[in-house]
Image: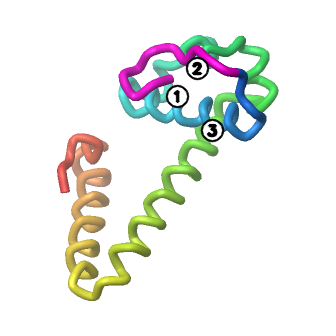
Amino acid sequence: MTKAGRVRRGRPLRFRDTKALITEVASDHFYRRGIRAIGMEEIATTAGLAKPAVDCFFHSKEDLVEECVAADAERLLSAADHLLSDIQNRSRLVRAVGRLFALEMFEGGKAADYSF
């Protein structure tokens, strides 16, 4: 899927590319509409794949959600490492993460709408 949300078309993908594509498409759908609102068939269609291809990588929706969370956590940790390399950004990062958790805990998961 492209950033514009269109179905992906083009050259055949390698094994790792396919798994990354499925994860990217699923993350986008989960964040936009919610985990319960999205089915594996819709993820497959948007990625330009057949559902059995998605099932080959992820045996359940729960497995796919776990992979999406792990990928997002890795990106967050990478960004945090970069920010923490500059001492001036540490306090800014700590405040931003604190606000993010406060939004998740006390405002019903509105962190996705929060701008740092």
Q: Residue at x 59, y 38 (%)?
A: 65
Q: Amino acid at mark 2?
A: Ala
| CA separation in Å, label 1 and label 2 | 6 Å
Among numbered discs 1 and 2, the one appearing first in the sequence? 1
Question: Where does the image place residue 56, in percent across and percent down from the top left?
Answer: 81, 27
Magenta stretch holds residue 68 = no
Q: How far apart are the alpha carbons under marks 3 and 1?
A: 9 Å
Image location of residue 11, percent across then percent down = 67, 21
Which residue reaches farthest bottom?
87
Q: Quadrant of residue 62?
A: top right
Q: Which residue is mark 1?
A: 25
Mark 1 crowdedness (10 Å alpha carbons): few <14, some 14-19, many ≥20: many
Numbered range of the magenta stretch: 1-11
Percent coordinates x, y for residue 98 in the rendering? 26, 67
Tag 2 residue: 47
Secondary structure, mark 3, is helix
Determine whether label 3 and label 2 are within 8 Å by CB. Answer: no
Left or right, 92 with respect to 84, comes to: left
Q: Which secondary structure is most common in the magenta stretch? A: loop
Comparing 11 with 59, the one in front is 11
Contact check, label 1 and label 2, Cβ < 8 Å: yes
- Residue 20, numbered circle: 3
Spatial distance from mark 3 to mark 2, Cα to Cα? 10 Å
